[in-house]
Image (spheres, rainbow, N blue to C red):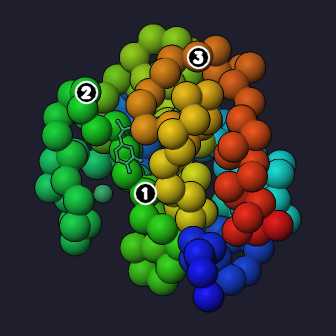
Amino acid sequence: QYGYTLPGWRKYNLTYRIVNYTPDMARVDVDEAIQNGLEVWSGVTPLTFTKISKGIADIMIAFRTRVHGRCPRYFDGPLGVLGHAFPPGLGLGGDTHFDEDENWTKDGAGFNLFLVAAHEFGHALGLSHSNDQTALMFPNYVSLDPNKYPLSQDDINGIQSIYG
Ligand SMILES: O=C1CC=C(NS(=O)(=O)c2ccc(-c3ccccc3)cc2)CC1=O
Ligand SMILES: [Ca+2]
Ligand SMILES: [Zn+2]
């Protein structure tokens, strides 16, 4: 009874939908950053992600500002919180929102969408924050080279403890 594994998804084939796009980046670059952010995790688990363009997906992705829709969490304008994601579950579960008041980029300027997305998707899959400085799930944003930013062993241990 001691200890517990964080609740994960009870299925491996998940769907996602990009509900709206940030004007900061080309649509194809947003699609690519999101897809790569998900592939970081599917690469080390049996999870698969299928993109749908309408209807309700497990992971609904949207760019929002301040108070938005029925979301219980708000954004704070430029800087500060960059995004938030809800742990696995029905309804809001898995949904991931990015703060549109940030400057989203696909390179080192502003905030790299791929990096933040990969971090938020960790939450959407059931991971909490890590105290390992090198972990993707570390609570503070570090702008590293997104092309070489692998998962740390801590991230892999975490996700495989849920979807091993
Ligand atoms: O649940 C929360 C609450 C606050 C958060 N702060 S954030 O949006 O500014 C944020 C911080 C760090 C990252 C990050 C960390 C490591 C690698 C890449 C991004 C992403 C977003 C992020 C988050 O997921
Ligand atoms: Ca913000
Ligand atoms: Zn939100």
Can the viewer see residue 26 in this picture?
no
Q: Earlier in the sequence, mark 2 or mark 3?
A: 2
Q: Residues within 10 Å of mark 1 (few under 14, many from 20)?
A: many
Judging depth in this view, the residue of 2 and 43 nearest the camera is 2
Q: SS at mark 3? A: loop
For residue 146, which quarter of the picture?
top right
What kind of residue is marked 2?
A: Leu
Residue 121, how many percent across, how many down? 56, 52
> Which residue carries the number 2 mark?
79
Q: Alpha carbon of mark 2 to alpha carbon of mark 3: how far?
A: 17 Å
Q: SS at mark 2? A: loop
For residue 85, which quarter of the picture?
bottom left
Residue 134, how many percent across, how many down? 61, 28
Ligand 2 within 8 Å, label 2 CB: yes
Is residue 164 shown above or below 83? Answer: below
For residue 50, which quarter of the picture?
bottom right
Is residue 103 shown above or below 121? Answer: above
**Ligand 3 rendered quadrant:** bottom left
Query: Residue sitting at 65 percent across and 68 percent down?
Result: 15
Is residue 22 shown above or below 146? Answer: below
What kind of residue is marked 1?
A: Ala
Residue 95, how many percent across, how many down? 45, 64
Q: Residues within 10 Å of mark 2 (few under 14, many from 20)?
A: few
Q: Residue furthest top?
A: 109
> Which residue carries the number 3 mark?
144
Ligand 1 within 8 Å, label 3 CB: yes
> Which residue carries the number 1 mark?
85
What kind of residue is marked 3?
A: Leu
Residue 52, how many percent across, how many down? 63, 65
